[in-house]
Image: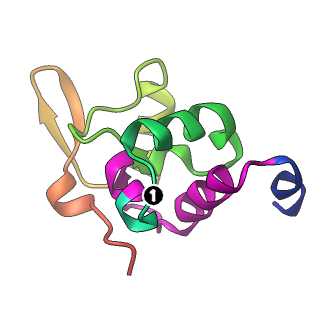
Amino acid sequence: MMGRMDELPQYAERVLDVADRIPPGRVMTYGDVAEWLGEGGPRQVGRVMSLYGGAAPWWRVVRADGVPLPGHELRALEHYRAEATPLRETAAGPRIDLRRARWDGA
């Protein structure tokens, strides 16, 4: 992990630090991460995760609607099931049960 810190922008480093802190089976939305940092917004956090988040637990930083990351749904669902992340079934497929899975950063 120390290697990636050398070449990352400071904001990206801070976002990935938050992602690394989220416990297994819990999630934060992109907006939650930005709010916790007191900087940026959901789009900035999403951009950091898309550019630099491959080595972080990216599946724990989610969209506010609980839909798994488009294009990565199957991999994300494998992680959610392995970590017992609360899910709910919808007509469109499984979604994260944010009411039960959301982590407040404490």
Q: Which residue is mark 1?
A: 39
Which quadrant would residue 6 be assigned to in this image? Answer: bottom right
Kindly identify the residue that appears in the image at 78 percent across and 48 percent down: 8
- The answer to whether residue 51 of the structure is visible from this angle is yes
What's the magenta region? 8-34
Identified by mark 1, the residue type is: Glu
Residue 30 to residue 15: above or below: above
Question: Looking at the magenta stretch, what is its main secondary structure?
Answer: helix
State the image coordinates of residue 4 (x, y, percent, origin top left): 83, 52
- The answer to whether residue 84 of the structure is visible from this angle is no
State the image coordinates of residue 33 (x, y, percent, origin top left): 41, 57
Q: Could you tell whether 35 is left or right of 50 in the image?
A: left
Q: Could you tell whether 12 is left or right of 77 in the image?
A: right
Color style of the picture: rainbow
State the image coordinates of residue 49 (x, y, percent, origin top left): 56, 40
User: Label 1: few (<14), some or many (≥20) within 10 Å?
Assistant: some
Kindly identify the residue that appears in the image at 44 percent across and 57 percent down: 83
Kindly identify the residue that appears in the image at 45 percent across and 58 percent down: 39
Q: Could you tell whether 51 is left or right of 89 in the image?
A: right
Q: Nearer the viewer, residue 29 or 81?
A: 29
Kindly identify the residue that appears in the image at 42 percent across and 35 percent down: 43
Q: Nearer the viewer, residue 7 or 98?
A: 7
Is-magenta flag for residue 5? no
State the image coordinates of residue 44 (x, y, percent, origin top left): 48, 40
